[in-house]
Amino acid sequence: MRISKLSASKHKKGRILVQLEGGELLRVGEREVAVFGLYAGKELTAEEKTALENAARESGLKDRALSLLTARPLSRKELTDRLLERADATEEEAEAVADELERLGLLNDRAYAETLVRHYSAKGYGPYRLREELRRRGVPRAYWDEVLEELDDPAEAIDALLRQKLRGRTVDRKELKRASDYLARKGYSWTDISAALRRYDNAE
């Protein structure tokens, strides 16, 4: 198989179109052009063509993974799921890409867990709701307790939410029940909620 033409893609930066005699078109990256020494007129064996296609596919999956991580942080599970769904990767290919990005320090579930906890605790979420977010995002359970132990005492956050909700009013049992349910939905334990309600009542 002889290469008849090399040209840069007009639609994707860094992609090279390799035209083979007979009309077949291969889409590769600049790295593959250099590694395989591609040029117009070069003869490719069947083995070289297969190796080139595999290398180009691997590079394409890495580029897709980097694009996903640039858009927003992801857990390893979220990344591999997206590669399986959107990039038509096999499970083996998706795991290999994730392994490589972890080695490069670009994918880190522990750091991602810390980011999630900081983000949602700033929104007033309590420990139970934070655990649910970590589970939903596919963060390994081994990291949950580590990052949650770094949280401040929830008392200050609950008191602030209560002040915001009740606005310093003297409230009846029905309103207290609504406030309790609100805090429970935020992910706080009943022990912490009841203590906060007592503090609010004493303050008022």
Image: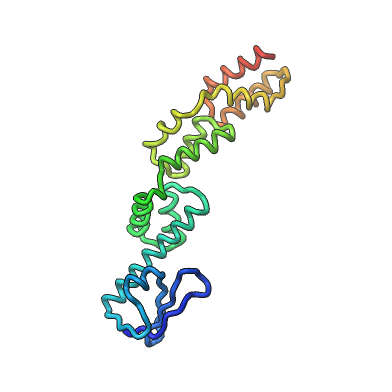
Report the residue at 40% width, 60% height from top: 62
Where residue 40 sits, quadrant-wise, is bottom left
Q: Which residue lies furthest to the bottom in this view?
A: 22
Image spot of residue 146 (x, y percent):
40, 32
Left or right: 131 in relation to 175: left
Image spot of residue 156 (x, y percent):
58, 23
| Colour scheme shown | rainbow
Up-down relation of residue 51 to residue 92 (above or below)? below
Where residue 100 sits, quadrant-wise, is bottom left
Where residue 35 sits, quadrant-wise, is bottom left
Left or right: 170 in relation to 192: right
Report the residue at 35% width, 86% height from top: 41
Q: Residue furthest top?
A: 202
Q: Quadrant of the C terminus?
A: top right
Up-down relation of residue 89 to residue 195 (above or below)? below
Image spot of residue 37 (x, y percent):
33, 75
Image spot of residue 197 (x, y percent):
61, 18
Up-down relation of residue 99 to residue 204 (above or below)? below
Q: Quadrant of the N terminus?
A: bottom left
Report the residue at 52% width, 20% height from top: 191
**Number of numbered discs on residues:** 0
153 or 184: which is nearer to us? 153
